[in-house]
Image (spheres, grey):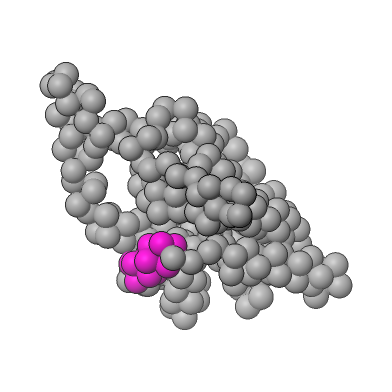
Amino acid sequence: MSWFESFVLGLVQGLTEFLPISSSAHLRLTAAFADWHDPGAAFTAITQIGTEAAVLIYFRKDIVRIVSAWFKSLTDRSMRGDHDAQMGWLVIVGSIPIGVLGVTFKDQIEGPFRDLRLIATTLIVMGIVLGVADRLAARDEAGGKHRAIKERKSLKELGVKDGLIFGFCQAMALVPGVSRSGATISGGLLMGYTREAAARYSFLLAIPAVLASGVFELKDAGEGHVAWGPTIFATLIAFVVGYAVIAWFMKFITTKSFMPFVIYRVILGVLLFVLVGAGVLSPHAAESAG
């Protein structure tokens, strides 16, 4: 991998990680369209450490408060009813599905799941799911002539059941094209949470999963499967760009719909099917590790 490739891929990772359009799919597609080697699941996992570092800094006050309350609750029974302490447990509970499924399907994630036809399918299907979830949220918020405005849930109403559902939604993002934020936000909206609550828990839930995945994949870099220099450079680029994107996105969702992302996903998925069907792109284009 050249330094220019690492710059472009780091930029793509930072731009797409927090948007509901799938960073893993865009890394895969960037390599395919540019006729580069597929950066691979290991490169993706390591560069995601950069974007998660952006999450740690952006949500640092929330994280410090949650971690502090969680540790106190281990020895102080009176703290176990505290919302922040409960959030600590719920992040742990919600991380179980992706941890189990990630280990179980590791070979598929790094192989068959990276087929461009599967990516096109997940882009379209999850785009439609996000669109439906977004419309339901908008209807609740707006009400209507014969329908009262419906109050949506905040994170204070999050329990173990919903936390696990969020976790299984996050685990779907093991398949490129699904999108971690897209799946968890869609799940949250369908369960009746506000856009802001669904997005906030989505980002907090991703921290242990992404950091664990990145650390686990570091061994590949040490064995020579990932180039250290370009990968670290891409990770730094992803961190800087990712921080800017998450700051923008959290403001965007308070007043705007997810429909622009839905339309983009569907168009990209259809275009990908057309290109593969016409023979312009092989479904395994740029698939060999480089």
Q: Quadrant of residue 121?
A: bottom right
Q: Quadrant of the C terminus?
A: bottom right
Give the left or right position of residue 208, taking residue 38 as reference: left
- Residue 127 in the image: x percent, y percent? 65, 58
- Residue 101 in the image: x percent, y percent? 55, 35
**In the displayed image of the protein, which residue is found farthest to the right?**
278
Give the left or right position of residue 91, taking residue 13 as reference: left
Q: Residue at x 66, y 75 (%)?
A: 33
Majority secondary structure of the magenta segment? helix
Q: Name the foreground residue: 289 vs 106.
A: 106
Q: Residue at x 44, y 74 (%)?
A: 11
- Residue 289 magenta: no
- Residue 252 magenta: yes
Would you say residue 162 is visible in this rendering?
A: yes
**In the displayed image of the protein, which residue is found farthest to the front?**
145
Would you say residue 176 is visible in this rendering?
A: no
Q: Name the foreground residue: 232 vs 116.
A: 116
- Residue 240 in the image: x percent, y percent? 32, 71
Q: Residue at x 33, y 37 (%)?
A: 156
- Residue 143 in the image: x percent, y percent? 55, 53
> What residue range appears in magenta?
243-254
Q: Residue at x 52, y 57 (%)?
A: 142
Q: Quadrant of residue 46?
A: bottom left
Q: Compared to 89, does 192 lie above or below?
A: below
Q: Compared to 21, does 175 lie above or below?
A: above
